[in-house]
Image: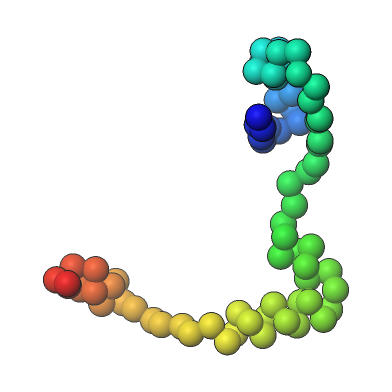
Amino acid sequence: MEALFKVKASELDQRLIDSIKKLFRDKDIIIKVSADFDETAFLSFYPANEKHILENISAEPAATFTAKDFQDYVNKPE
């Protein structure tokens, strides 16, 4: 069994520990603690990666809609 808890460090309290103990009872468990991070910022740390990311973003097709154009498209019968 596996469970993932995503909480702010300030929210850690005895209730969380009690919940984990109740959920897993007498089983051996592994606790891994990590901080959330911005994957794009991490990958952009290296200039070659950042260049690759920006090239891929700029290669994506783009479209421009007015609000009316978008509504017309959404409401168009199939």
Residue at left 68%, top 80%?
Answer: 54
- Residue at the extreme left of the image, as rendered: 77
Q: In the picture, residue 45 is in which quadrant? A: bottom right
**Residue placed most toward the observer, 7 or 25:** 25
User: x, y percentage for residue 6?
Assistant: 67, 35
Residue extending farthest right = 46
Q: Residue at x 17, y 72 (%)?
A: 78
Q: Residue at 53% of width from left, 83% of height from top? A: 60
Q: State left or right for residue 11 relative to residue 69.
A: right
Task: Provide residue 61's location: percent of width, then percent of height.
Answer: 48, 85
Above-or-below relation of 53 to 38: below
Where's residue 18, x and y in %? 71, 12
The colour mode here is rainbow
Tell me which corner region of the image, top left, top right, bottom left or bottom right, holds residue 57: bottom right
Considering depth in this image, is 2 or 46 the residue closer to the camera? 2
Q: Quadrant of the N terminus?
A: top right
Relative height, residue 45 to residue 62 (above, below): above
* Image-based side of 21 in relation to 33, left or right: left
Find residue 42 and report its horizontal and vertical position in percent. Answer: 79, 63
Q: Is residue 62 visible?
A: yes
